[in-house]
Image: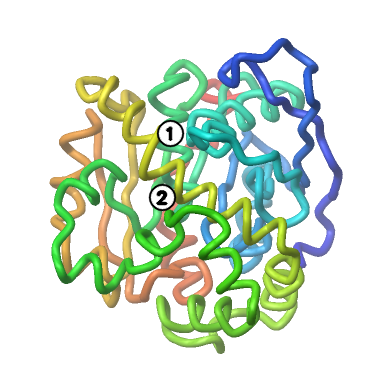
Amino acid sequence: MLDGFESARIEVGPGPEMGQEEGANALSLHVRQGGEGPPLLLLHGYPQTGAMWAPVAAELAKRFRLVIPDLRGYGRSDKPASDADHAAYSKRAMAGDMLRLMSALGHERFQAAGHDRGGRVLHRLCLDAPERVARAAVLDIAPTAHVFQTTDKRLATAYYHWFFLIQPAPFPERLIGADPIYFLHHTLGGWGSGLDAFAPEALAEYEAAFSDPETIRATCEDYRAAAAIDLAHDAADADRRIQCPLLALWGSNGVVDRLYDVLATWERKADHVSGRAVEAGHFLVEEAPRETLEAFLDFFETDEKNTG
């Protein structure tokens, strides 16, 4: 996947948001890079890796320097141990990874896009380091706190995994681990337009990742954090808003479109919001790469004065 892109492991953490000194318990991320131009950070979601960006990466790389990590706990990145309050998988910790990653690569100001869980990391990144993010795009999500606050039968049915994965360990880990490929295929196929939307190489990478019990554990921790420490962080920052221009894209055939007024929801969280539905289910990049790419090219700046 992502032919022609550099692939490396880069040390990023854990960082001060974990209450530890710089350099303690070093954490490394698997990162792909490619292209020329101002930096654009691309963050994947569950249950994927950075490979999800392959359908749009080649064209974006003609205008941007792409940085495509596997989030902590996912893919070939490190998977920190669990802790009682799930802080190791808080979106604040994941956002801190991204700040240190971009600094290590020489990008003090950058643009970013995040799909699914990556969008939630990006939301936190915009709140915790507004001076670093020039423009942000979130794909097929409503804000985490809003989702929990408005949960009803429709949401609980469609997002059953939110409530399954947060159950105490090792319950979901054991059940998923009994047949991880079945669970992965059911998730990927059920949220979008079927498995045919995914390139064989990408699907193979997701399968390899989910065959590792540590990936299953770590990704459950991601969701446990969302229902615990992330909500505490969101409550503390309830009055803070995203300051940079925000693009919201979502699938017209998906849950987010059915349950939310997406732009109105994000307008309560950000000062400058634009966006629209894309003809797709949940996996916009794979299901509608051309439309997603066009939206990105219209939104992200190529002016070196704005990023770098």
Residues packed near mark 2 inside 10 Å, few (<14), some (14 to 19) or many (20 plus): few
Can residue 71 be seen? Answer: yes
**Where is residue 237 shown, x and y percent of the image?**
28, 21
Q: Give the residue at mark 2.
A: 298
x%, y% of residue 205? 74, 70
Q: Nearer the viewer, residue 93 or 292?
A: 93
Left or right: where does residue 33 sit relative to residue 51?
right
Residues at circles 1 and 2 in contact by the CB criterion of under 8 Å: no
Residue drawn 61% across the image and 25% down it: 99
Q: Quick one: SS at disc 1?
A: strand
Residue 286 horizontal/vertical position (percent): 53, 73
Q: In this view, does 177 lie to the left or right of 291?
A: right
Q: Which mark is on residue 135?
A: 1
Instruction: Name the amino acid type tagged 1.
Output: Arg
Q: How many marks?
A: 2
Mark 1 neighbour density, 10 Å: few (under 14) some (14–19) many (20 or more): many
